[in-house]
Amino acid sequence: MSGHRSSNRLVMDLLGAIKDEGPVGVTRLLTVANLTHARLQELLAMFASDDWVQEVRDDDRGRWTITQRGEHVLADLRRVDRVMQDHGLGI
Amino acid sequence: MWVVVLAHLLLPSAVAGVAAFGAWRCWRLLRYARDPRLLRLTWFYGLFAASLVAYAVWTGQVHAGGATEAFAELHAGDASGEHGDLHARFGGPERINGFLLAHHGLMLASLGVAVRAFGHRRREGTVAAAAGLALLGPFIPVALAVEAALTLYLAVQAILNHRERRTPGALQVAAGFFLFFLGHLSFFLFHDPGVGRNPLGDVFALVGMLLLVQLLPRPSA
């Protein structure tokens, strides 16, 4: 299998970091996700519109937390990943 | 005789239903994020279900005529024949039409997608060559042999994966693909021209498909 990170894995990494470390700032997420700032903002906006994460603003700094729906999505994605590996389908 | 005709129709339809459910569940899980592995599984289940729908139509067409005759004979008091008559009534030359060709074409495509997904190296050439074999000999027996060979490959891959991972899920996948292989091996070994798939093989395929689809998580969000 190729070493290319799937969209599934990227979403899982981001939601996982927000869940484990939230409220978390964009700078920290940039190091976790290894994405450009613009791409990360695009993804966060998409997650927010799906009600997976929400932005908490304090002192003009945006920090992100996971919602209950986001936690369900993260759990589903992790289960899908486990099932794919049970099928012998890697990353 | 009706029981046998229904077994030829209901069992493949049940396998198609389970496969269609698997495709639908994978599709629902794809809403979260585009995962190429899940996309390939969706295609595998979807093509598999479509293949069996074509087969069910073929069975319905082929057996409808014979069943109507048998029903008429039953009412006329001439129902001397039992199961053996099924082969006399339907057996003989292959009844190849568009639906049977679509069934085998879609089945080979479905298994090709699975081999491509589960193989650790790219196998397009191997799959295309295997499918091409079906054009060289008598189409139906060769197609059945190729299908059995592809399912054997999937079963071996799943067993090797279980040996590496040793998880209950990997064991379930290995058992599912092994039963799947037994089903397709039965279709090949007990192929009866003009009659259709062997019901015992369909039982194996149904249980195998249930094991595979049962593993797919239900979306909770």
Image: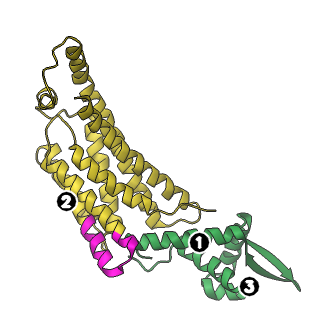
Chain colours: A green, B yellow
Tell me the kind of residue under disc 2: Ala
- Marks 3 and 1 belong to one chain: yes
What residue does disc 2 label? B149
User: Residue B76: where, in percent of width, then height?
Assistant: 20, 11
Question: Tag 2's secondary structure?
Answer: helix
What residue does disc 3 label? A24
Q: Residue furthest right?
A: A59
Q: Residue at x 29, y 79 (%)?
A: B163
Q: Is residue B184 above or below residue B34?
A: above
Give the left or right position of residue B99, taking residue B217 as reference: left
Tell me the kind of residue under disc 3: Val
Question: Tag 3's secondary structure?
Answer: strand
Q: Chain of mark 1?
A: A
**Are the residues tagged 2 and 3 within 8 Å (C-beta)?**
no
Dot label at residue A75: 1
Q: Residue at x 11, y 43 (%)?
A: B138
Question: Does residue B11 show up magenta in the picture?
Answer: no
Alpha carbon separation for disc pair 3 and 1: 19 Å
Region of the chain picked out in magenta, as a range: B154-171
